[in-house]
Image (cartoon, coloured by chain):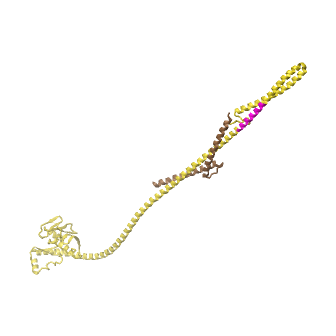
Chain colours: A yellow, B brown
Amino acid sequence: MSVNIKVKNFQSISDADITVDGFTILVGESSQGKSACLRAVNAACYNKFKQGFLKYGTDTLRIDIRHSDDERVLTVTKTKKDSPEYKLGDTVYQKLNRTVPPEVEDFNGFGSIDSYEQKYPLNFFTQFSKPLLLEFSQKRILEILSSSKAFDDMNDANSKLNKKKEQNSGAFKQVSAMITDNKQQLSDYTERESQIHDGIGNMNSLAESLRTCENSLVMAENLNAELLSRLNAEQRSESLKKILALCSDITDLNDRVERLETLGGHVADSEKAEKATETAQERLSLCERHITLSDERNALRDDLLRELEKHISESRDAHARIKELTAVLTTAEHAVEVRKSLGAANASLNTLSRLSELMDTYRSVHKTVHDKQAMVDNHICPVCGNKIM
Amino acid sequence: MDVEKIYKETKAELDRLNTEQAVRLEKIKTLASEFGFAVDTNLSKNVADKKAELEKEKARLESELEAVVSELEKTQA
């Protein structure tokens, strides 16, 4: 069975929480509140509150006691002016006038002897206090023991004490075993504590490494993102450069194609011009040939006209000669008979025949000239017979 | 038919053709030298062959440009 004790605002104690389980030793430096804890329990168990118990600067002190085998909690509160108030479970006890309710005594299990309005503890002794009756003189002991109620109380207390002793006898053995176990556990705990310290150190080291790794990971992710961004930018830049270069190449190519088409156009125009030049030259040659032929024709016509005029003149002369001969013949007719007239006539016939030949020649030449003129008029070359352009 | 008139007109046309041809020949020489062609009877064929070659190169460049633009669009997406 363990007892839990909570103390607030008692002397130097602000807030203490103590669990007493079997044999318990309070260890600590001076003025830490070990004795104050005992005084608090003593004050709560025997309603022995004094001035100075309330912590300086506070209004109320409070002591809570809980037994592990009892659901109830004993709560004792005390203000500077008011008397202590006890509360056990749901029951509240006030104005106790330095007495302790029997239910509370029974709850605590501490026996006491009442004598002459004094309450002497039987099984609870505070620090520096002597066991029951040892501090008193024999007279006082007799007075206490001779009080009417003291023996009954003492018997009750003894019976409770014996009961507690029996309990404590078993508890002592258990406490001894527990002390041995506790020592072993303490050794184990010490070793485990060392291991835990090492583990904590390792965990701290691992946590630090983990934080470093996390930071490195974040930095790596940032660098990776930045790298990807730069890579994309470089790729875009390279692509744009390629596009610009390709556009420039295509533009140059278009320019070259355009200039090539211009050259082709010039070449085609040149070929057409050459053909036109050839045609013009042919036409020019024809014209020159035509002019030459025209000159020749005119010269020939002039010759023919002169020849014709000559023949006409000769014909006229012949006609005049004929007339003369006719006159001569007429004259000689008389003189020369038919034979002479016949001879004269024959001569005349010869002359006429020659005249007739001359006339035929004239007609032929005239016809030739007329035909050539007609060919020229019809744009036909009088020499080769081809069409003049 | 006035042959003299025809002769004069033909002569004038011939002079004009010769003048134009001279100017054109200078342009042809300039452009032909740019492409490394000789001004001879094969000039037309050389021009046609070169044009076909340039058209082929242009088609290749346009195809490459389309590929690069597609790649850029993928990168931007």
Q: Is residue B47 left or right of residue A327?
A: left
Q: Looking at the image, which residue is at 65% across and 40% down?
A: B12
**What's the magenta bit mostly, secondary-structure-wise?**
helix
Is A305 part of what is drawn in magenta?
A: yes
- What percent of the width, then of the height, locates residue A56? 17, 70
Q: Looking at the image, which residue is at 67% across and 34% down?
A: B2
- What percent of the width, then of the height, locates residue A229? 44, 59
Read off the magenta span: A288-306
Q: Camera-side residue: A386 or A189?
A: A386
> Farthest residue toward the top?
A334
Q: Is residue A302 visible?
A: yes
Q: Quadrant of the C terminus of chain A?
A: top right
Q: Is residue A216 left or right of residue A381?
A: left
- What percent of the width, then of the height, locates residue A34? 21, 74
Q: Is residue A374 above or below residue A41?
A: above
Q: Looking at the image, which residue is at 75% across and 34% down?
A: A299
Q: Camera-side residue: B49 or A326?
A: A326
- Count how many numbered circles sit on residues in the image: 0
Q: Is residue A167 above or below residue B30?
A: below
Q: Camera-side residue: A206 or B14?
A: B14
Which quarter of the picture shows residue A61?
bottom left
Which quarter of the picture shows residue A387?
top right
- What percent of the width, then of the height, locates residue A124? 17, 75
Q: Quadrant of the N terminus of chain A?
A: bottom left
Q: Is residue A137 left or right of residue B14?
A: left
Is A222 part of what is drawn in magenta?
A: no
Q: Is residue A156 visible?
A: no
